[in-house]
Amino acid sequence: MTTTATTARERMLLAKDAARSIGLLGDDAKRDALLAIADAIEAAAPEIVAANAEDLRRGSEGGLSTALQDRLRLDEPRVAALAAAVREIAGLPDPVGRILDERTLTNGVSLTKVSVPFGVVGSIYEARPNVTVDIAALALRSGNAVVLRGGTAAEHTNAALVREMRGALADRGIDPEAIQTVDEFGREGARELMHARGVVDVLVPRGSAQLIETVVTESSVPVIETGAGVVHIVLDETAPLDWARDIVVNAKTQRPSVCNAVETVLVHRAAADRLVGPVVSALQQSGVTVHGDPSVERLAAGIVPATDEDWATEYLSLDLAMRVVDDLDEALAHIRRYSTHHTESIVTQDAANEARFLAEVDSAVVMTNTSTRFTDGGEFGFGAEVGISTQKLHARGPMGLAELTSSKWLARGAGQVRA
């Protein structure tokens, strides 16, 4: 069932052909295929980790950033987590064939709107082997084929993962051409993928702001934009110290290299004397460098003076910007200016301020009294995520199975003609 393809275009055409049969698979067949993929990944963990070690070695020698090395790294527990995520996706309800709307016209024609697969989903990403598995599993569960461009940093890891997933499909009698990678074609493969309109139905970029901007501006394939995360937490006047400290530390340090990690903390001036010192101290004890405005510098030691660039920076590291604001209005104005519309949170016990924050902040996910690290497809119950969309058309926020489907209308008549 495997066909040799010598160009990226041929790989994508194979995926398009395979998408027809994948889209017709029933719920049980798709579930069984994903369970087989999970088993194959788990069984091949030593080989996958060895391939990943080679990528890490090359990345370290080539000056790959600490944040990207963290995203690249796969050890045995992380491989097990990949398999577990696939099993969780397998257990989710089938998103295909859902009745979205139905009605009967006055002439008796019956209309039913149902969910259908896109067809071929493409993704361009960097140093994220988990995306290789997550997007492939979500695509298959939603009846789609997938074309992957994972970048040179994870070349060996991605090749090992794709090999195991394709083998699992073949063992179940499912066309393995439904999972394709164009990694071996390098940047030309990425360019071909971005210009495969009519072959690839939708493209999802994941990675740096520069990568996403390149895909959005250069692609002729429809793109679902997943944005960078200049994420904010506001510590309101009524914020309890223990909540403020624990939420900020978790949001920054639980995994600093990801897009839902907090980058800027805004502290209400009326609470600054009470909160800034303890929160900064807790951050510093966790290895965080705090870049603060003059008010923060007066209230805590060891502060790096913040510049205008800090407010717009997605650090993806153990760095955080902190500013004291006069009131909620100033906090909201700061967020409107610098936010990338990913995730924002407020810590408060003031019901009116909580309601204002939820209503006025224009981001994909708006939170109160909790860590921004919960903006995640797995945490939202999607099993995994295609990405976190910061756009407003079709999908917004963590994207799961439903966001990989489109719809079509089914019209059933009995000889009616239009007058």
Image: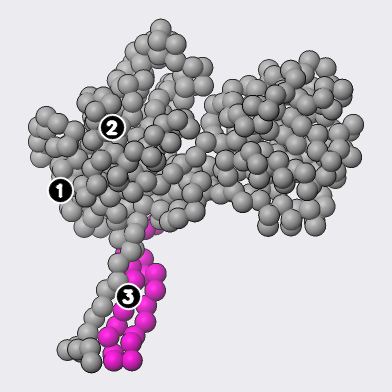
**Residue at numbered disc 3:** 112
**Of 384 and 216, the residue lying toward us:** 216
Task: Pick whichever of labels 3 and 2 is earlier in the sequence.
Answer: 3
Task: Pick whichever of labels 3 and 1 is earlier in the sequence.
Answer: 1
Residues at badges 3 and 1 in contact (C-beta under 8 Å)?
no
Res 17 label: 1
Judge whether 249 appears above or below 337 on screen. Answer: above
User: Where does residue 328 sit, x and y in percent of width and height?
Assistant: 79, 47
Identify the image quadrant of the C terminus.
bottom left
The amino acid type, in three-letter code, at marker 3 is Thr
Q: Secondary structure at mark 1?
A: helix
Which of the 4 quarters of the picture holds residue 231?
top right
The Cα–Cα distance between marks 3 and 1, rounded to whole angstroms, is 27 Å
Residue 96 included in the magenta stretch of the image: yes
Which residue shows up at 79% across the image and 53% down it? Answer: 353
The Cα–Cα distance between marks 1 and 2, rounded to whole angstroms, is 20 Å
Judge whether 399 appears above or below 154 on screen. Answer: below
Q: Nearer the viewer, mark 1 or mark 2?
A: 2
Task: Pick whichever of labels 1 and 2 is earlier in the sequence.
Answer: 1
Residue 398 visible: no
User: Where does residue 193 sit, x and y in percent of width and height?
Assistant: 26, 37
Res 190 label: 2
The amino acid type, in three-letter code, at marker 2 is Ala
Identify the image quadrant of the N terminus.
top left
Q: Secondary structure at mark 3?
A: strand
**Of 393 and 283, the residue lying toward us:** 393
Residues at badges 3 and 2 in contact (C-beta under 8 Å)?
no
User: Where does residue 3 sit, x and y in percent of width and height?
Assistant: 9, 36
Residue 107 included in the magenta stretch of the image: yes
Which residue shows up at 22% across the image and 85% down it? Answer: 413
Range drawn in magenta:
92-114
